[in-house]
């Protein structure tokens, strides 16, 4: 790989033939760059956050362009040897992994999710992907693994998997989230039907609402509506008890 450190231009470009982006809990790690960058910046240091180059994903080409974060471009560092660079990068990575472990053990669910994302973000194919920038060490293809690796415990998303012979896996959020979002909205037709039934039963008792000659036949309408609603009410009760049992 060749590198360039020019403002507004990518440092380098990787593709999904050589490395594969990782996903956790229904999220692509790369797409959470801003949140992960801010976590490392404020919890550890801006230099540690500088490990994560800013990714720009092009799914049509199956490539990722990597950029120097804009807020790092005012803090240049002196060049060091390759060994010193790797030691510095390893120190930052160790600090970040310790933070990820702490977040993963949090009692807060959101913090645990962020910890899992950060842990996967610190995955990279090999030491060859640790580079020296004018602002310190950085990771090319962070949140990736080598295409040759055997993937068993993490979800892999390949943007152009079908074209490249890579099996793509679609990461979906837990189904329970969809159930929680529905709430009473999914039952509003039944509730409206019950309200209409109650209204039709009460109307004959309001003097002057319905002419006397029609009152003898009026009871048929609520009865028909009740017969229509009975199966729906039964289904509602069944679903309610099933959902309560799952909880």
Image: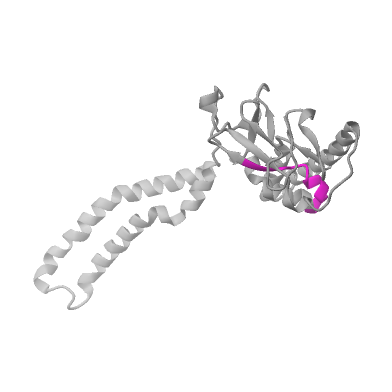
Indicate whether 147 appears above or below 130.
above
Q: Is residue 111 visible?
A: no
Residue segment shown in magenta: 42-56
Indicate whether 187 appears above or below 137.
below
| Residue 181 inside the magenta-drawn segment | no
**Residue 142's quadrant in the figure?**
top right
What residue is at 25 percent from the left and 69 percent from the top? 202
Q: Position of residue 138 (x, y in %)?
A: 78, 39
Is residue 159 rendered to the left or right of residue 29?
Answer: left
Which image quadrant: the N terminus?
top right
Is residue 61 rendered to the left or right of residue 1?
Answer: left
Residue lying furthest bottom in this view? Answer: 208
Q: How is the image coloured?
A: one colour
Q: Position of residue 226 (x, y in %)?
A: 25, 55
What residue is at 87 percent from the left and 36 percent from the top? 85
Residue 65 versus residue 43: which sits nearer the camera?
65
**Residue 104's quadrant in the figure?**
top right
Residue lying furthest left in this view? Answer: 213
What residue is at 53 percent from the left and 47 percent from the top? 177
Q: Count the marks: how many?
A: 0
What residue is at 90 percent from the left and 37 percent from the top? 80
Residue 194 versus residue 106: which sits nearer the camera?
106
Q: Position of residue 247 (x, y in %)?
A: 54, 45
Q: Is residue 212 visible?
A: yes
| Residue 54 inside the magenta-drawn segment | yes
Q: Position of residue 154 (x, y in %)?
A: 65, 31
């Amino acid at each position: 790989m060749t590198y360039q450190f020019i403002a507004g231009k990518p440092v380098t470009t990787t593709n999904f033939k050589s490395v594969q982006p990782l996903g956790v809990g229904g999220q692509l790690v790369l797409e959470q760059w801003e949140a992960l960058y801010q976590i490392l910046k404020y919890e550890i240091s801006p230099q540690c956050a500088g490990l994560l180059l800013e990714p720009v994903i092009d799914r049509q080409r199956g490539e990722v362009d990597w950029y120097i974060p804009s807020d790092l471009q005012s803090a240049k560092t002196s060049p060091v040897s390759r060994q010193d660079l790797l030691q510095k990068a390893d120190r930052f990575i160790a600090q970040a992994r310790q933070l990820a472990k702490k977040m993963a053990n949090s009692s807060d669910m959101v913090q645990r999710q962020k910890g899992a994302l950060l842990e996967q973000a610190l995955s990279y194919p090999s030491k060859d992907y640790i580079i020296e920038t004018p602002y310190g060490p950085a990771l090319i293809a962070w949140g990736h693994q080598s295409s040759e690796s055997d993937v068993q415990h993490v979800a892999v998303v390949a943007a152009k998997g079908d074209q490249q012979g890579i099996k793509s896996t679609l990461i979906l959020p837990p189904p329970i989230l969809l159930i929680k979002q529905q709430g009473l909205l999914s039952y509003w037709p039944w509730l409206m039907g019950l309200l209409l039934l109650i209204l039709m039963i009460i109307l004959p008792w309001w003097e002057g609402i319905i002419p006397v000659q029609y009152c003898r036949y009026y009871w048929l309408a609520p009865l028909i509506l009740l017969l229509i609603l009975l199966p729906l009410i039964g289904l509602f009760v069944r679903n309610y008890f099933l959902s309560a049992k799952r909880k």
